[in-house]
Amino acid sequence: MWIFASFVGFTLFVAFYSWYKIRGENLYTSDGYFLGGRSLSAGVIAGSMMLTNISSEHLIGMNGSAYKNGMIIISWETTATIGLIFGALYLVPRYLKMGLSTIPKFLELRFDRATRSLAAILLVFSFVFTLLPIVLYTGAINFEGIFEISSVLGVTHQQSIWILVVIIGVIGALYSILGGLKAVAVADTVNGIGLIIGGLLIPILALWEIGNGNLLSGVDTVYNYAPEKFSIVGAPDSVLPFSAIFTGLVINQIYFWSMHQSIIQRALGAKDLVAAQKGLLLTGVFKLLIPIIIALPGVIGFYYFGDSMYDNQDFIYPMMIHEVLPVFFIGIFAAVFMGAVLSTFNSVINSAATIYTIDIYKIYINKDASERKMVMVGTAVSTIVAVFAIFVAPFMSYAPEGIYQLLQTLNGLFFVPLGTTIIAGFFLKKISAAGVKVALVIGMVFYGFTELVVDIGIHFVHVWGIMFVGMIIIMYIVSYFYPVEKEFQITDVEVVDISEWKYAKIVSIFLIVVTIGIYILLWGPPN
């Protein structure tokens, strides 16, 4: 009873606070609905970026992977600073200078409209077929673990997952449809604070209990029980080889944190460049702390449960919640967890609607669409995408290597080809539209073949690196025969102030030093 009461109370508080903060906003223009009126502050940007990223697929999937594989998987988090620094210092100033609403718009300015449309379609597909279903499924797993809905309703476990997927999907869709980006971002800020507090409590309370009131003693006990779990260095045949950081992982991080629409849309909605740069770099600080929340509980779970959960690794985090949190706080944390799930879900829905409305509908279907009409189309697309994700989500239970590994494997099909295209657009002036389109298609076919059809015996992150280099070579070859007709120049459309934050470079250096320090601290024999 206490769990349910605290859950409902905190959820209603966040909903009321979000309504209160946006009650005077104009949600009937495309900038107002899709970009929060270009008024987002640094704190809101950082909180929303973090919570859009850290959701159920991290809390459930990454802790499950850490339980089984150890701390080697935190490279997914620590190397995020590479993409955030690159975005803050180089890309975001240019995005805001061009007044972009979507990343595909840049591809039209740099290459042609067909490239923009192709990228827009791929982005929408990546949202619908990978991220959204996985977020819903992992969210449902956690709520089943906390509230035991199957027992309460007298249904099977699978039926409970279906019920929870529908409930979470409907609530998440309503957030995005009714409030636009501003409502999403405001709710994210509140839930982000709760996620950090609640997420830190789980390992702290666990280590306190294990160490009989002494945190350091708890750390020593867990470490001595399984020291190999604390190594950040992955062997060549591990779930994440250390060498992968220098091949495909860096490309993935640059794309996700500085080019991926659902993440960078917060920076596109910044009130000025200073707010955007502060927001991205503050997110970098959060990302260096996040492994304590999304990896350490999994390792502690190995101390509690041994290898008994290896076949059900994605259930380890709900078990840890029940193991260490006080009863009343379980409900509050469940509400925060709901916020994390909703944040990613409704953020991605909003991004899918933004891309479809601005990059497809406005160009090919109704060129004269009014601002209000575009918002109406955006809400309709949000509804359709949400319904499809709800239908697909329960089938994610068949992932053999854990849900987080499935997500990253599927992401490569879209992230690396699109990231390579955008990088070429900014840095390789001789690459033409024809070269990009041919490379994009070949790159995706190559990855799909090597990962989904034939196992070539190379880790999929290394395949990302191979795909990146191969696509660049193809771009140059095709561009030799179909050269660039006119050199691209960035024009300042004067949408917001693009004066840089004077401490941006200093903070970036600090993030790099701390990132390297983490690897030195956790260096050990390959796990």
Image (cartoon, rainbow, N blue to C red):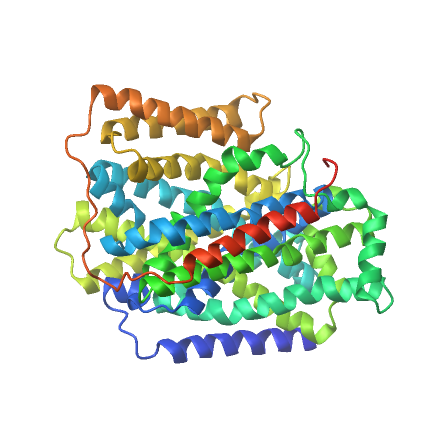
- Residues 325 and 393: in front is 325
Which quadrant: the N terminus? bottom right
Q: Which residue is at a point 71% across and 64% down the rendered structure image?
A: 202
Taking the image as shown, residue 138 lies to the left or right of residue 18, namely right
- Relative vertical location of residue 310 with respect to residue 505 in this rendering, above or below: above
Q: Which residue is at a point 44% across and 46% down the rendered structure image?
A: 256
- Relative vertical location of residue 369 with respect to residue 229 in this rendering, above or below: below
Which quadrant: the C terminus? top right
For the question of whether residue 173 can be seen, the reply is no
Q: Which residue is at a point 23% across and 31% down the rendered structure image?
A: 433
- Residues 107 and 280: in front is 280
Farthest residue, direction right: 212
Image coords of residue 294 (percent x, y) = 63, 55
Image coords of residue 387 (percent x, y) = 42, 53
Taking the image as shown, residue 420 lies to the left or right of residue 169, namely left
- Residues 118 and 497: in front is 497
Count the marks.
0
Q: Which residue is at a point 46% across and 38% down the rendered structure image?
A: 251
- Relative vertical location of residue 82 with respect to residue 279 in this rendering, above or below: above
Figure quadrant of residue 93: bottom left
Image coords of residue 374 (percent x, y) = 22, 59
For the question of whether residue 69 can be seen, the reply is yes
Image coords of residue 73 (percent x, y) = 64, 44
